[in-house]
Image (tube, rainbow, N blue to C red):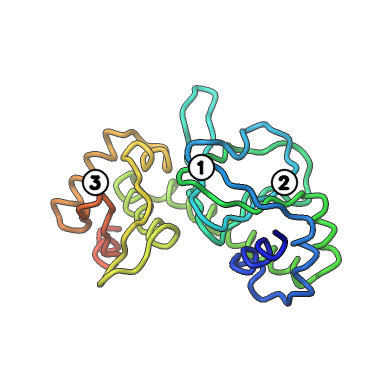
Amino acid sequence: MLDVIKKHLQGVSLFKDLSEEELQPVVAISQMRIYKARSFVFMQGDTLDRVFFIHSGKVKIHKIDAGGKEQIVSVLQAGEMFPHAGFFRKGTYPAHAEILETAELIVTPIADFEAILIKYPELCIKLFKVLGEKIIDLQNRLEEQILHDTYEQIIMLLLRLCQSNGVPINDGYKITTHFTNRELANMIGTSRETMNRTINRLRKKELISIDQDGYFLISPDKLRKEII
């Protein structure tokens, strides 16, 4: 099983440049678990004690506000880790982690992993770079909400999904996760009705389309021209 975990961890971006000797301590403290679709890895408010690395499948990170409304933070896939807020702090998980597609996850105790980070500075630096990218992403999202109207925010969301949940196809991207209009709306805090109208508007203008399997096909260059 340890060899299987090692092989899986080598596919995670955080560890891909580590030697086997450097990776071995992480392998030794980790376990592989399979989670079925619609199950929860953890719930918002659970004790924060583990970090997860995705080998396969997709995980939705979302929060529920005081009014019971869902706010989707991100949809993560193979090669990514979560929660990013899990290191060097005590407390509880800040959001729910729900499995969208049956997933193989590598589970690592945070306390043990932090000890390894301290021992291997190069791994710690790589982690800080990953966290830095997440901070920039959150800053960009905040800027979108402050400086752009809802129509432009939806366009920026679709452009962001090209990078986080898309694959290149022809002269654009195919979003490889099925998102409902409600889920898309919950990502930026708008209504499902507003999302419906905007998606239909973008389709009529031939800026986006949907293939026979229900996946979004997006031409980023065309979409960017819609942003003032």
Q: What is the residue that sits farthest to the left in this orientation? A: 204
On the image, the x and y values in percent for residue 62 come to 52, 39
Q: Secondary structure at mark 3?
A: helix
Q: Crowding near pointer 3: few (<14 within 10 Å), some, many (20+)? A: some
**Residue 191 numbered mark, or none:** none
Q: Label 1 to label 2, Cα distance in Å?
A: 16 Å
Q: Earlier in the sequence, mark 1 or mark 3?
A: 1
Q: Determine whether 57 is above or below 79 in the image.
A: above
Q: Nearer the viewer, residue 65 or 174?
A: 174
Residue 167 is situated, as x and y percent measured from the top left of the image, at 37, 65
Q: Is there CB contact under 8 Å for labels 1 and 3?
A: no
Which kind of residue does numbered mark 1 sit on? Ile
Q: Position of residue 71 (x, y in %)?
A: 48, 36
Q: Judge left or right: residue 188 versus residue 99.
A: left
Amino acid type at image mark 3 = Ile
Residue wearing tag 2: 50
Q: Residue at x 60, y 51 (%)?
A: 105
Residue, x 53% and y 49% (percent of image)? 103
Task: Tell me the mark number nearer the camera, choosing from 2 and 3.
Answer: 2
Which mark's residue is nearer the viewer, 1 or 3? 1
- Residue picked out by circle 1: 99
Residue tagged 3: 199
Q: Nearer the viewer, residue 198 or 165?
A: 165
Q: Earlier in the sequence, mark 2 or mark 3?
A: 2
Figure quadrant of residue 224: bottom left
Q: Secondary structure at mark 1?
A: strand
Dot 2 surroundings within 10 Å: few (below 14), some, or many (20 or more)? some
The answer to which image quadrant residue 55 occupies is bottom right
Q: Quadrant of residue 19?
A: bottom right
